[in-house]
């Protein structure tokens, strides 16, 4: 009889110990799964953080801010400073376009530049970026400052990174540039400035 009790005690003990082992193993597996899911999440987050976002800013004015008169027809008419960052490593060149969609006669093109080096990080105030000049609505090949005839206008500085250099000659129109780069755009961004001329006596 004692032998039966001893065997029964051993069996019960084994079952209890086995249950704890299984429970611990399950907890470890759950912990490992959670750890792996967090790891995958971190990889995704890190990938997102490492993705380059093209940025165009200016020390001359803030996005959606007022363009200083020195950059317009009421001042020196010089180009604002521009800072570029986050260019895709695959980019072979940059395209810069400035236009005014509020002009009474339709969109007015103030600045068209293409085949700008993808390594360009700063375009200093009053300078032209190294590249090829397209032609603006005024027949200009360089920066042509805001000069709204009626009210406040918006001026869009558009920057594109593309995976090629455009096979266009100096003096190409904005439309020609847009068509040529259409299938090659990797990134794009814009900086908007506003300007309204003061009432003259």
Image (cartoon, rainbow, N blue to C red):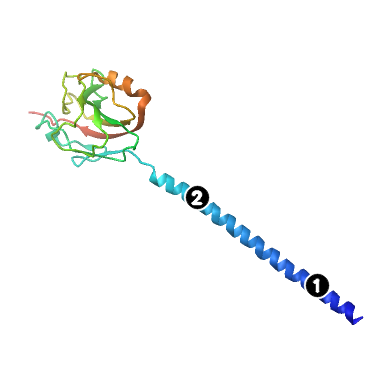
Quick one: 82 or 5, which is closer to the camera?
Answer: 5
Image-quadrant location for residue 7: bottom right
In this rendering, position of residue 46 left or right of residue 67: right
Total marks placed: 2
Q: Residue 48 at x, y = what percent?
A: 42, 44
In this rendering, position of residue 173 left or right of residue 41: left
Residue 155 makes an appearance in the image: no
If the image is split into quadrants, where does the N terminus sit? bottom right
At 23% from the left and 37% from the top, the residue drawn is 120
Q: Residue 63 at x, y = what percent?
A: 26, 39
Q: Which residue has dot 2 on it? A: 41
Residue 130 makes an appearance in the image: yes
User: Given contact means CB atoms under 8 Å apart, are the residues at marks 1 and 2 in contact?
Assistant: no
Circle 2 SS class: helix
At 32% from the left and 20% from the top, the residue drawn is 180
Circle 1 SS class: helix
Q: Is residue 34 above or below residue 131?
A: below
If the image is split into quadrants, where does the C terminus sit? top left
Q: CA distance from mark 1 to mark 2?
A: 43 Å
Mark 1 or mark 2: whose residue is earlier in sequence: 1
Q: Residue 113 at x, y = what percent?
A: 22, 26
Quick one: 141 or 106, which is closer to the camera?
Answer: 141
Quick one: 93 or 200, which is closer to the camera?
Answer: 93
At 43% from the left and 45% from the top, the residue drawn is 47
Q: Which mark is residue 12?
A: 1
Dot 1: few (<14), some (14–19), or many (≥20) neighbours within 10 Å? few
Image-quadrant location for residue 117: top left
């Amino acid at each position: 009889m004692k032998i039966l009790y001893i065997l029964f005690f051993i069996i019960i003990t084994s079952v209890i110990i086995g249950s704890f082992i299984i429970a611990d193993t399950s907890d470890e597996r759950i912990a490992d799964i959670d750890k792996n899911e967090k790891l995958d999440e971190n990889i995704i987050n890190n990938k997102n953080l490492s993705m380059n976002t093209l940025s165009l800013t200016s020390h001359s004015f803030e996005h959606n801010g007022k363009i200083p008169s020195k950059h317009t027809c009421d001042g020196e008419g010089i180009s604002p400073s521009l800072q570029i960052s986050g260019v895709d490593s695959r980019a072979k060149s940059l395209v810069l376009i400035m236009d005014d969609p509020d002009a009474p006669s339709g969109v007015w093109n103030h600045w068209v530049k293409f085949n700008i080096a993808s390594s360009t990080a700063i375009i200093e105030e009053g300078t032209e970026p190294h590249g090829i000049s397209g032609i603006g609505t005024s027949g200009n090949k360089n920066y042509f400052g805001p000069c709204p005839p009626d009210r406040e206008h918006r001026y869009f500085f558009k920057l594109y990174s593309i995976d090629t250099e455009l096979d266009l000659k100096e003096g190409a129109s904005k439309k020609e540039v847009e068509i040529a780069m259409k299938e090659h755009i990797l990134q794009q961004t814009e900086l908007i400035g506003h300007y309204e001329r003061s009432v003259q006596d």
